[in-house]
Each structure stands twice: as structure tokens, then as C-alpha cells.
């Protein structure tokens, strides 16, 4: 039998009178002993009623739930880093934060030459179409006279553009020569020496060696440009003939640029010494950079002069065709040829329009400019990142879930989301939109990427914010629940200790268990009733 507090109380009441009758000393020692007995009895009573330190649990019904938690990052549904298909100088770029519609121009390169080619092609097409109309209706004498005058003017314009190309080529040769002797030779020692050396030491020895060995070769190429210029002077005003000489001049400019780039590379590795100070090195770099600018300007001028010849020849050809048609009168074959020229000119127009499109970046979807990597006036290379475009509308939480958690998630499931930046009290609801099938190991644990859609209307939300995702899954709606720690096993069977009536005894009872949550709560299928008290083993 267990000693109850009532028995302890009776014992205390029976001992107390005898204790008082025994005197002060006896009283003191008797009370001390009695207190020891009471403390021991009370502690023994608590231990027994807790099952020798055992834990009690009242069996109850409720939902059997599991909770999945993981972290992620907020992103837009679509984001794109956009670039130009060609190089050039930036003339416009949309600022960070600007809202743009799909199809809007968000960056543009300087494109005067390309725009001129489009305008010329458009004008040529319109002229061909007008020519066809004349063929169809026939020509009057005054129209023939005007056509003759236009042809003479076009031939004179072509001659002038040819002369301008020759003049430009001479200036380009002069600029190349000056760039070498004034901007490049400044970083070398006395040119009269048989073996040139740089005026500074550099860690880029390969670039320095190629620069020194290539200087005389490239200067020879510049002097040889005179042959191409002489050929331009004697050649007829025909694009087909002039093109070869023009391309030879372009190659020469390219060789000079390569020489300056070697100089720039060598200067990048320049070593400051007592003889060559930092300001001196900076003046060398400025000189080489100035030479590169001069080269670019010369090349642009040469391209523009040749394009002008091309445009002038196209205008002359159209004027010639117009005059020929008017002189000969309408002919079915002429009409067919005119129609063929229109088709060819329309194809050319589409080609130059497509080329002009490479000078622009078009927004592939509606959104907001998230980042800008260049500024107006910057020279950029093909496919260099220019802007990052973030899609508008709903945002997306992306995170990785372990293989243990992923079975508890499904597409369409609602989840609770909080943000580190906003605190735990700010809760948002998201919906699972995608669960990747391909696993990826993170810290030797297989994980799967999960994407969750979330409303983007709250202005505080921004891509890149850290998120915490939580989802509770009900595995059984109305189950008899029991913590795992109250179950023990014997011979393959599951048992629990159940308090008998009055709570003074416990009995072992076999139970049938069902599903178990990851937090250690088990569904009891048989063997217990709601309200019964179980004791931990």
C-alpha cells in the first residue's frame, strides 16, 4: 500500500502531544526527526504518484499534423539580363525602377549610319515603285527630260562621293601615321636606335615584345596604304571595284589598332620605378588612349565615306534605270524587271531594318528595370550585359526542400511565408506552383527545388529578400493521439502503461498503432479510449 498524505498527517498528530510532554530538548530532536519522516514520506508519495518520475498523458482526440519548414529567396517569375547583338556607343538606357511594357525600347546605341542605310533603302524602294508606275502608264517628253537631268546629277554626285572617299582615305593614312609617331612612339626610346626598347618596365613581357617587333611592320603597312589610295584614284566609280581597296584600308586600320592595344596591355603591367614615375606612366596611358580614340574616329570616317559612295551609286543606278525606261518606252519585260527590282529592294530594306534592330534592346515582357550596368556614352561590346529586366505581377519564392520534407508538399498547396526583413508577425500566403523532380545534393543531403507564387502587391516586397516557409499538413482529421515516448514494445507488440481507477496502479495494455507524425505523435487505432491516462515506461 502507498502511504498517503492523510496517513502522514495522522502520524504527526499522534506524535506531537508526546513530543511536547518530553521537554524542550526532546521537543527539538523529536520535531527534527518528525520533519525528516514527513519529508521522506511526502517525497515518496510524489515519486509513486508520478510513477517513480514517470510522465503522465491524457489520451485525447485531434488532428494528426506534420509541419514542413524551409528557407528560400524571393524572385520575380521572369528576369532577364539583356544585351546588344553588336557593339557601339550607348545613346539611351532606361533608368533603374522604370516600368516598361512588352516591346518597349529600353536601350539604344548610336546608329546614325544604320539609320541612313534604312533611309536610303526606303527611298530606293519608293523610287523603284514609282518607276514601275511610270512603266505602266508610259512617259511624257517633260518626264524624259527630267529623268535625263536626274541621271546627270546622280552621276556627278557619285563622282563627288568617290573623290570624298579618296580624300578621307588620305586623311586616315595621315592620322594613322601621326598616331604611331606621336601617341605610340612616346612610350619608346630614341627611334634612331637600331633596337628599340620601352621607356618603362612591365610584367606583360609578351605584349611588350610583340609591340616592339610589330611597330616597324605596322608602320610599313600604313605607308603601303598609299597604294590602295592610288588605286582608288584610278578606279571607276563602281562600288564593286572600290570595295576591295576600301577593305584593304580597313585592314590597315585594324593592324594599327592591334598595335595600340598591345601598348595598352603593356602599360597595364607597367612598374613604377625611380626613372619612370607614376605621373609619367599615366601620361603614357593617356597618350595611347588618345591614339585609340583617333583610330576609332578615322575608321568611322572611312566607313561613312564608303557608305556615301554606295548610296550615291544606288541613286545613280536608279536614275539610269528610270531614264532608260522612259527612253525605251514601256515593255512587258521591262515591267517584269522593275517588279523584280522592287522585290530585291524590299528584301534589302528588310535586311537593313533588321540590322538597325540590333542597335536596340526591346523588352521581351512587361516589367521593371532592376539593374543597369552601363551609362550613356559608354562603348560596349556585343552581348555585354546592359540591363536586367524583372517581370511585373506575382513574385516567386524559390527554395530547396530535403527529401524527408518533399513528400508532404504538393502543387496547389497553400503555405505560410514570413520575411526576415519584415519580422515573424507579418505573414503572407503563397501557393506551391512547381516541385522539381531532379534532386540536387546540398551538404550531402538530396534536396528538391520548390517554387511558390506570392502576391506582389505589397510594395515592401523586393526580389532577393530571404523568406521562411511553413506548411502544416493534416494527415488524419480526428485521431486518437499519443506521443511516441509513452509506447514500449515486447515480442513485436506495442504496449502502454494505463493508470487504473484512482491512479494508484498501472497496467500494461497492448495497443494497435497507425500513422506517426515526424514530431513523434502516433495515431492509436485500438486499445485506448479518449480520456484515459497513460504513464511513460
Image (cartoon, helix red, strand yellow):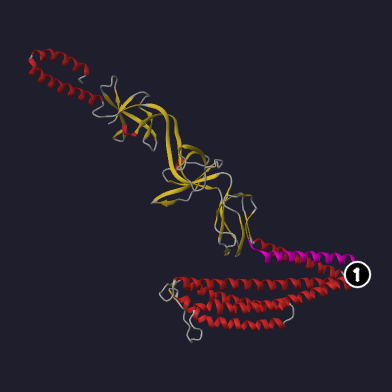
Q: Is residue 470 above or below residue 168?
A: above
Pick the front one: 389 or 331: 389
Residue 68 in picture, x, y percent from top left = 43, 40
**Badge count:** 1
Residue tagged 1: 142
Q: Is residue 110 magenta?
A: yes
Relative placement, left or right, of 45 versus 274 is left
Q: Is residue 336 above or below residue 17?
A: below
In which image quadrant can residue 497 be found? top left
Q: Is residue 375 magenta?
A: no
Q: How would you classify the magenta stretch by its main secondary structure?
A: helix
Residue 521 in picture, x, y percent from top left = 37, 34
Q: Residue at x 17, y 24 (%)?
A: 40
Pick the front one: 142 or 284: 284
Residue 28 in picture, x, y percent from top left = 10, 19
Q: Is residue 122 above or below residue 495?
A: below
| Residue 413 appears in the rendering | no
Farthest-out residue, right: 141
In which image quadrant can residue 484 be found? top left
Placement of the N terminus among the 4 image quadrants: top left
| Element carrying mark 1 | helix
Relative placement, left or right, of 342 versus 84 is right
Placement of the C terminus among the 4 image quadrants: top left
> Residues in magenta?
109-137
Q: Is residue 260 above or below residue 359?
A: below
Residue 111 in picture, x, y percent from top left = 66, 64
| Residue 375 appears in the rendering | yes
Binning the other alpha carbons within 10 Å of mark 1 as few (below 14), some (14 to 19) or many (20 upward) gives few
Amino acid at each position: 500500500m502507498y502511504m498517503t498524505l492523510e496517513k502522514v498527517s495522522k502520524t504527526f498528530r499522534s506524535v506531537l502531544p508526546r513530543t511536547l510532554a518530553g521537554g524542550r530538548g526532546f521537543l527539538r530532536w523529536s520535531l527534527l526527526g518528525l520533519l525528516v519522516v514527513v519529508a521522506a514520506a511526502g517525497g515518496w508519495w510524489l515519486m509513486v504518484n508520478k510513477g517513480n518520475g514517470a510522465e503522465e498523458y491524457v489520451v485525447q482526440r485531434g488532428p494528426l499534423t506534420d509541419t514542413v519548414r524551409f528557407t528560400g529567396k524571393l524572385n520575380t517569375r521572369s528576369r532577364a539580363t539583356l544585351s546588344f547583338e553588336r557593339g557601339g556607343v550607348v545613346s539611351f538606357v532606361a533608368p533603374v525602377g522604370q516600368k516598361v511594357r512588352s516591346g518597349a525600347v529600353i536601350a539604344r546605341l548610336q546608329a546614325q549610319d544604320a539609320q541612313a542605310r534604312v533611309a536610303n533603302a526606303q527611298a530606293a524602294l519608293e523610287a523603284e515603285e514609282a518607276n514601275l508606275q511610270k512603266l505602266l502608264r508610259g512617259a511624257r517628253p517633260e518626264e524624259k527630260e527630267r529623268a535625263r537631268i536626274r541621271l546627270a546629277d546622280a552621276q556627278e554626285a557619285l563622282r563627288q562621293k568617290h573623290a570624298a572617299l579618296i580624300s578621307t582615305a588620305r586623311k586616315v593614312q595621315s592620322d594613322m601615321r601621326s598616331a604611331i609617331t606621336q601617341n605610340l612612339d612616346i612610350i619608346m626610346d630614341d627611334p634612331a636606335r637600331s633596337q628599340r626598347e620601352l621607356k618603362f618596365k612591365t610584367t606583360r613581357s609578351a605584349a611588350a615584345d610583340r609591340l616592339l617587333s610589330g611597330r616597324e611592320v605596322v608602320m610599313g603597312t600604313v605607308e603601303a596604304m598609299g597604294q590602295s589610295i592610288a588605286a582608288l584614284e584610278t578606279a571607276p566609280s563602281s562600288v564593286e571595284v572600290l570595295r576591295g581597296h576600301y577593305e584593304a584600308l580597313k585592314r590597315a586600320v585594324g593592324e594599327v589598332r592591334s598595335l595600340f592595344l598591345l601598348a595598352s596591355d603593356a602599360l597595364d603591367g607597367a612598374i613604377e620605378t625611380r626613372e619612370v614615375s607614376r605621373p609619367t606612366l599615366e601620361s603614357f596611358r593617356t597618350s595611347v588612349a588618345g591614339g585609340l580614340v583617333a583610330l576609332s574616329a578615322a575608321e568611322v570616317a572611312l566607313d561613312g565615306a564608303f557608305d556615301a559612295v554606295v548610296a550615291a551609286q544606288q541613286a545613280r543606278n536608279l536614275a539610269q534605270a528610270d531614264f532608260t525606261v522612259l527612253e525605251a518606252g514601256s515593255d512587258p519585260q521591262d515591267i517584269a524587271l522593275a517588279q523584280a527590282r522592287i522585290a530585291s529592294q524590299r528584301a534589302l530594306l528588310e535586311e537593313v531594318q533588321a540590322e538597325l534592330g540590333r542597335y536596340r534592346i526591346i523588352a521581351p515582357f512587361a516589367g521593371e528595370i532592376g539593374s543597369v550596368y552601363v551609362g550613356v556614352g559608354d562603348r560596349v561590346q556585343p552581348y555585354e550585359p546592359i540591363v536586367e529586366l524583372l517581370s511585373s505581377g506575382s513574385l516567386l519564392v524559390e527554395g530547396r526542400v530535403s527529401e524527408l520534407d518533399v513528400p508532404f508538399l504538393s502543387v496547389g498547396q497553400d503555405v505560410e511565408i514570413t520575411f526576415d526583413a519584415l519580422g515573424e508577425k507579418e505573414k503572407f500566403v503563397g501557393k506551391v506552383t512547381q516541385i522539381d523532380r531532379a534532386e540536387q545534393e546540398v551538404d550531402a543531403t538530396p534536396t528538391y527545388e520548390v517554387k511558390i507564387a506570392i502576391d506582389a502587391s505589397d510594395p515592401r516586397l523586393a526580389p532577393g529578400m530571404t523568406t521562411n516557409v511553413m506548411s502544416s499538413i493534416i494527415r488524419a482529421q480526428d485521431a486518437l493521439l499519443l506521443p511516441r515516448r509513452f509506447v514500449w514494445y515486447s515480442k513485436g507488440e506495442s504496449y502502454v502503461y494505463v493508470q487504473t481507477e484512482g491512479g494508484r496502479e498501472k497496467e500494461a495494455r497492448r495497443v494497435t498503432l497507425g500513422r506517426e507524425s515526424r514530431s513523434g505523435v502516433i495515431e492509436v487505432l485500438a486499445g485506448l479510449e479518449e480520456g484515459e491516462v497513460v504513464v511513460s515506461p
